[in-house]
Image (spheres, helix red, strand yellow):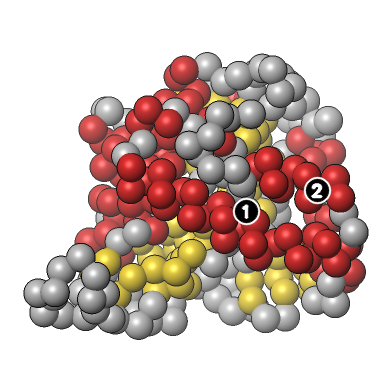
Amino acid sequence: MDEIDAVVKLENFRFETAAALGEPLFDISFDTISGAGEHGAIVHYRVTTATNRRLEPGELYLVDSGGQYMDGTTDITRTVFIGPPDMMPTAEQKRHFTLVLKGMMALSRARFPEGTTGANLDVLARQFLWAAGLDYDHGTGHGVGCFLNVHEGPQNISLKGKAALRPGMITSNEPGYYRAGHYGIRIENLILTREPEKTGGESAEEERPMLSFETLTLCPIDRRLIDTGLLTADERRWLDGYHRQVRKTLLPHLQQLGDERTIEWLERATRPITEAQA
């Protein structure tokens, strides 16, 4: 399979699955970014017949895609390892992927007061890369419209994000790392800003209600690329909880479609991170 094959297959899956579930897809929300190996390090890469390359074992593959559904616009990026089950990523690939993942989780778990802007939160996603002397040259998140533009302001999460995040706003959460000439890594979910609330949990002394995020995107994160030794106990719990929600939500739809092969894959892909990775 090559980059164009993957784009065509993914877009066909979007249309076929939406139709089968009775939720028609109007169109893709933007041209799919399909970057294998070194092409993944080109942030806004668009494959052409001249640049098209195969997905080779041992390499990373980055795919950024979305759909325009009647009830909303989606945007998701996943980076996956290409190769048979007995082939494992390099220690460097896993380390860089895990640093990006830790930043994505930190932003997902954030609680913050009213009036907080995207510029205030951007560092949460970059902190682990910065500690390693690494960074990425794009914003951490952009606003997403409802059946509108996939980049829809006024909110964004970046060093230039001046608009306050308000309940009901949908924003992307997409830190990354790009090693020129080798591979790119980006993990993107859409997140919804929730109403402010007090948790009533760890601290009975909470004085102010805090806003937080709800993760809307439900898709497994490649467990083969995670260096579990770099994760804290809280990060493991968040990731296991996310994968439980992915499995719980998607499984009934796959059962409706009668897709046994994908059901088996989903169950493997969403196993707790504390279990042996396979």
Give 269 or 187, whichever is nearer the viewer.
269
Gap between marks 1 and 2 measured at Cα: 13 Å
Q: Is residue 137 left or right of residue 30?
A: left
Query: Which residue appears at 53% of the width and 43% of the height?
Result: 272
Horizontal side of residue 182 vs 33, given as left or right: left
In percent of the image, x 49 and y 32: which residue is there?
226
Q: Could you tell me which secondary element the residue under label 1 belongs to?
A: loop
Please give the label number shown on residue 219.
1
Q: Position of residue 268 (x, y in %)?
A: 68, 41
Provide the residue designation for mark 2: 262
Residue 18 pos. (x, y %):
82, 68
- Residue 254, how many percent across, how many down? 80, 60
From what the image shows, is residue 22 above or below residue 108? below
* Viewer-nearest of discs 1 and 2: 2
Q: Tell me the kind of residue under disc 1.
A: Cys
Residue 212: quadrant of the picture: bottom left
Q: Residue 163 in the image: x percent, y percent?
A: 30, 74
- Amino acid type, mark 2: Thr
Image height of 233 relative to 278, above or below: below
Between discs 1 and 2, the one toward the N terminus: 1
- Residue 128 lies in what quarter of the image? top left
Residue 155 visible, this orientation: no
Which of 211 and 186 lies nearest the eye of the viewer?
Answer: 211
Quadrant occupied by the C terminus = top right
